[in-house]
Amino acid sequence: MDMVDSGDWMINYNEVIKDKSLSYITRLLAADLINNPYLTLGDFFKNLADVEVDILVEKADHLLQDDEEHFKSLEEMIILTMMLCQAEGVSLSSEQDIREATNLLAIITHGVSLGKKGIVEVKYDKLSLGKEFENEVVFKRI
């Protein structure tokens, strides 16, 4: 399956939609981005239900484990990261950029989960995978 258009680090949304091994969250995001290619990271997370955030937290947790779910979760988190970066206009010019953005998405996912549980305040308008926002405070303990 070729979900990345070669050379451009761009996700082929139609291929993502067809891939039943990906979660409905990822496939629905791809369908939404076909119709409206711009979406902020904050809006993406604000629109997720608690159970959907929990699904993404589980995938993020598998990134740290050495089990059979690791590679499935890694693939999905990379695809999700690349789609969200495209939607935000964040450039990913190397594999290192993709790795860093994927790790950042996993961290943000956990922070949003804590926010949905009332443990931290989430500044959704400041959430981004762009390097220009890397020093922004996006979570504040309540």
Image (cartoon, grey):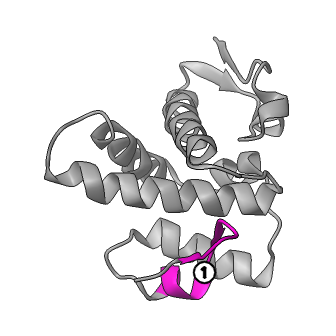
Residue 48 seen in this snapshot? no
Quarter the N terminus occupies? bottom left
Is residue 25 on the magenta stretch?
no
Closest to the observer, 97 or 23:
97
Q: Residue furthest top?
A: 141
Left or right, residue 75 beside residue 95:
left
Residue situated in front as seen by the camera: 27 or 47: 27
**118 horizontally vs 40: left or right:** left
Dot 1 amino acid type: Asn
Q: Relative to residue 18, is residue 102 depicted above or below? A: above
Please state the extent of the stretch shown in magenta in the rendering: 4-17
Query: For residue 72, what is the image quadrant?
Result: bottom left
- Using a 10 Å C-alpha cutoff, classify the residue at mark 1 as few (fewer than 14 neighbours), some (14 to 19) or many (20 or more): some
SS type, badge 1:
loop
Q: Please give the count of numbered marks on the rendered protein.
A: 1
Residue at (66% x, 71% y) in the render: 7
Q: Residue at x 43, y 49 (%)?
A: 56
In the image, residue 39 above or below residue 67: below
Q: Is 9 colored magenta in this rendering?
A: yes
Residue drawn 58% across the image and 53% down it? 81
Residue 134, percent from left and from top: 75, 25
Locate residue 62, reporting x and y percent. Answer: 28, 42
Please give left or right for residue 84 compared with residue 126 in the image: left
The C terminus appears in which quarter of the rendering?
A: top right
Q: Residue at x 37, y 52 (%)?
A: 74
**Percent coordinates x, y for residue 67 in the rendering:** 14, 45
The answer to whether any part of residue 139 appears in the image is: yes
Occupied quadrant, residue 139:
top right
The residue at the far front in this view is 7
Please name the residue that numbered disc 1 is placed on.
Answer: 12
